[in-house]
Amino acid sequence: MNYPEANSTKPYDLIPLTGQPGLALPALFAPDAGTARREIELFTANIRNHHTRKAYAKAAGEFAVWCDRHGIEHLRDMQPVHVAAYIEELQLRIAASSVKLQLAGIRMLFDWLVVGQVMPMNPASAVHGPKHSVKKGKTPVLTADEARELLDAIDTSGIVGLRDRALIALMTFTFARVGAAAGKMHAGDVYVQGRRTWVRLHEKGGKRHEMPCHHKLEADLHNYIEALHAAAKIHGAAVDPKALLFSTTEGQSGTLTGRPMSQPDLYRMIRRRAADAGIQTKISCHTFRATGITEYLRNGGKLEVAQQMANHESARTTGLYGRRNDQVSLDEVERILIERRSNEYLY
């Protein structure tokens, strides 16, 4: 978990967790051992997604800081008006989407404490967050030409280049999430079925998602896996189907470690590859997922099929990734003609 360190200098008291050296809870949420244990259960047993756990723990800690600053020292003193005042203050500092995330974390925590009979009621249940409607995603996307230029610019003379090209192609052609592609995929998750290469993705929520490979992805994966087999053969071994497919390297040696690539590792890699390809768009780890969905829809693909391929619960979420209308907007903008005639501008 991502709680503050026990020697934190933040302006609230911390209660060290028994058996958890270096970790602590805000005093507001740990007035006794039973309450502390109940909260720890939320962030360990109930919330399984690492990113959700981290975000909600951060929300609880920041809310505790605010309560300490305003003299709210006990859970029994917590009222809906306090949560509402905190949310109002947040709206002056951070985006509406971030405020809604903070409120969701606080609300879940209080719900958990109510179910555990620590509190009689949830003071956050009656508090409404800011209105926030999104019709277009913010993830930067690449054009088809830029994506191809990026892939072609990768030097595949070594195993690291083969790894990077296969990983970027995987995220682009299968719409795979970062965690499913870099953190959980094993060598045995690339397999042949019906004379076609398939990939098995382990998506969030424990969902297993299988997809056939685009022919360009198939070639990139096979080249990388052949390099893995050749490297293992040098040491008189074979590639373990349970071994991670994409792993970090040992410094600048180009030797794979077998350890999973973290999201920061992947971000640094794609930024480096983008710079080498001369791409100025500030891409992120999610760019390739958005790029793949956008190009699929732009070339006549169906939204409901894209939803299935992306493993989204809602087609609306898939639609946020699809940025095919951006090209329409650019074409229309070019209709604004400003021509120079006789030293005058005509608008």
Image (cartoon, helix red, strand yellow):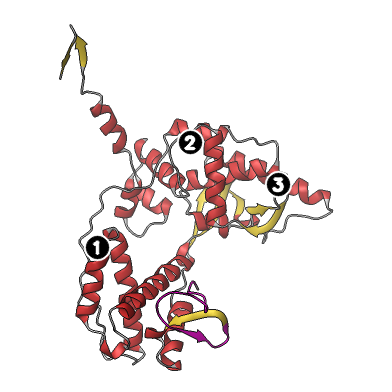
Residue 71 showing in the rendered view: yes
Assess whether residue 266 is covered by the magenta stretch.
no
In the image, residue 53 sits, relative to residue 160, either above or below, namely: below
> Where 216 falls versus 194 (above or below)?
above
**Closest to the observer: 163 or 94?**
94
Does the magenta stretch mainly form a helix, a strand or a loop? loop
Q: Residues within 10 Å of mark 2 (few under 14, many from 20)?
A: many
Of tags 3 and 2, the one toward the viewer is: 3
Disc on the earlier residue, 1 or 3: 1
Which residue is labeled 3 in the image? Answer: 252
Give left or right: position of 21 versus 139: right
Answer yes or no: do the residues labelled 2 and 1 have beta carbons within 8 Å?
Answer: no
Q: Position of residue 338 (x, y in %)?
A: 21, 18
**Residue name at image x 32 percent, y 89 percent:** 74
From the viewer's side, name the closer residue of 329 and 29. 29
Closer to viewer: mark 2 or mark 1:
1
What is the three-letter code of the residue carrying label 2? Ala
Residue labelled with disc 1: 91
Q: Position of residue 201 (x, y in %)?
A: 53, 57
Res 130 quadrant in image: bottom left
| CA separation in Å, label 1 and label 3 | 45 Å
Q: Horizontal and vertical percent for residue 37?
A: 46, 88
Q: Can you give x and y, in whole percent of width and height, for residue 319 in the image?
A: 31, 48
* Of labels 1 and 3, the one closer to you: 1
Horizontal side of 329 relative to 145 (left or right) equals left
Q: Earlier in the sequence, mark 2 or mark 1?
A: 1
Q: Secondary structure at mark 1?
A: helix
Extent of the magenta region:
2-20
Q: Quadrant of the C terminus?
A: top left
From the image, tell me which residue sits under label 2.
147
* 165 lies above or below 112: above
Please, what is the three-letter code of the amino acid marked with disc 3?
Answer: Gln
